[in-house]
Amino acid sequence: MPACRRPASPPGLRPSRLLPQSHTLCRRCGKRSFHIQKHVCASCAYGATSKMRRFAQHYKAMRRRTQGTGRMSFMKSMPRRAKNGFREGTMAPKKSSA
Ligand SMILES: [Zn+2]
């Protein structure tokens, strides 16, 4: 039996007392890759650059985080707004009862 055994912790949980966490959740990609001291995400390079970190040889990783994998909260309204010429601030004319 090893001499420096620590008390049993739940499996899969990091013993935060012995091994402090260096990464926390990234607010841009959501992965736990944001380095706390460096303030840079190892997965998406948030904090280092405004562009997403991506490499062509990692085509599977690009597939997982490209456009269309999220909510598309801005892009999904583009076709409807483009159809009407991106008008803003107008009101629909009142429908007259026939
Ligand atoms: Zn990130």
Image (cartoon, rainbow, N blue to C red):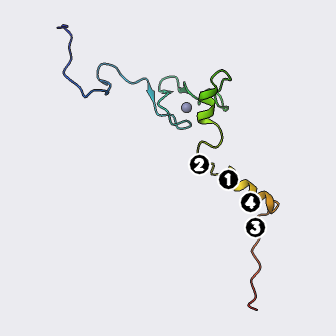
Relative to 2, does residue 6 appear above or below in the rendering?
A: below
Whole-angstrom CA distance, mark 4 to mark 2, is 16 Å
Q: Quadrant of the N terminus?
A: top left
> Is tag 3's residue or tag 2's residue first in the polypeptide sequence?
2
Assign a secondary structure to mark 3: loop
Q: Quadrant of the C terminus?
A: bottom right
Assign a secondary structure to mark 4: helix
Residue 56's x, y, as percent?
Answer: 68, 23
Q: Give the residue at mark 3.
A: 89
Numbered label attached to residue 88 = none
Q: Give the residue at mark 1.
A: 76
Q: Are marks 2 and 1 in contact (CB under 8 Å)?
A: yes
Whole-angstrom CA distance, mark 3 to mark 1, is 20 Å
In terms of image quarters, where does ligand 1 lie? top right
Q: Give the residue at mark 4.
A: 80
Assign a secondary structure to mark 2: loop
Q: Are marks 4 and 1 in contact (CB under 8 Å)?
A: no
> Is tag 2's residue or tag 1's residue first in the polypeptide sequence?
2
Q: Amino acid at mark 2?
A: Arg
